[in-house]
Image (spheres, rainbow, N blue to C red):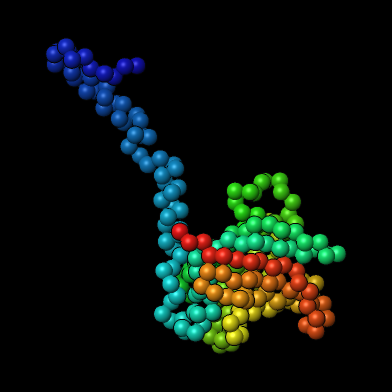
Amino acid sequence: MNYRVSRNSHSPRLWSVAILELSFLLIASPVVLAESPASSQAHTDTEFARALISKGPSPQLPKAAAAVYDWLIGDWEADVYDFEPGGKKRVDKGEWHFRWVLEGRAVQDVWIVPIRPSRVIDAPTMNNRYGTSLRTYDPKLDVWHVFWVNPVTQDRSELIARKIGNTVVQQGIAEDGSFMRWTFRDITATSFTWRGELSSDGGKTWQLDAEFVVRRIVR
């Protein structure tokens, strides 16, 4: 149907009909006036981000405690080395994103391997990561609690973190009873190395399970 009015139509009745038809069109077409689903979703995502992400650490957090992880805030890329039984090494690319969250009382990350442009739906779960860690400070023990979950593999870990010299050491016990040690080391403003180690003899000896060589993404 054509809703355009001819320039030669001077009849008041014709103009009235045209105005009524135009009014009906506006009422019957909510997409023209209402927010589109995509726009509504974008608004919801923005509100969620505002509720979650903080500009910095909470003033109630001791400065020394905040400094344990504050240097990580930002976006990083990584060369990922996974060491499988038998000495085989798998090499991949990863991306790592860190933010202060929950009014600056916690640090959360998103750890993705392989990186998003390379991901496929039916990829093997081995060494496949799209997970998150939440780090919260415990003033009574003067430590950070670290909770990691990877829905791809259903892997879950809980560790205790302390800063020792220029390294951040996170330790826990795996489901099979072996000791875990995850370490941020070789820390600079633009790079660091992360090492994941396992011990089956109570911490007497350690086996390298994974190593990430990480570089800050500067935008």
Residue 78 in picture, x, y percent from top left: 61, 62
Which residue is at the front of the view, 219 or 52? 219
Residue 79 visible to the viewer: yes
Q: Residue 129 occupies which quadrant of the picture?
A: bottom right
Residue 132 in picture, x, y percent from top left: 60, 63
User: Is residue 169 positioned above or below 120 on the image?
Assistant: below
Give me the residue at 67% from left, 62% from top. 80
> In the displayed structure, does residue 48 sit left or right of residue 95?
left
> In the displayed structure, does residue 170 sit left or right of residue 49?
right
Residue 150 visible to the viewer: no
Q: Residue furthest right?
A: 86
Q: Quadrant of the C terminus?
A: bottom left
User: Is residue 137 positioned above or below 113 on the image?
Assistant: below
Give me the residue at 78% from left, 78% from top. 206
Q: Quadrant of the N terminus?
A: top left
User: Is residue 158 positioned above or below 22 on the image?
Assistant: below
Give me the residue at 83% from left, 65% from top. 87
Residue 34 in picture, x, y percent from top left: 35, 39
Which residue is at the front of the view, 151 or 114? 114
Residue 47 in picture, x, y percent from top left: 42, 57
Which residue is at the front of the view, 171 or 48? 171
Give me the residue at 37% from left, 34% from top. 31
User: Is residue 67 positioned above or below 191 on the image?
Assistant: below
User: Tag count in the figure?
Assistant: 0
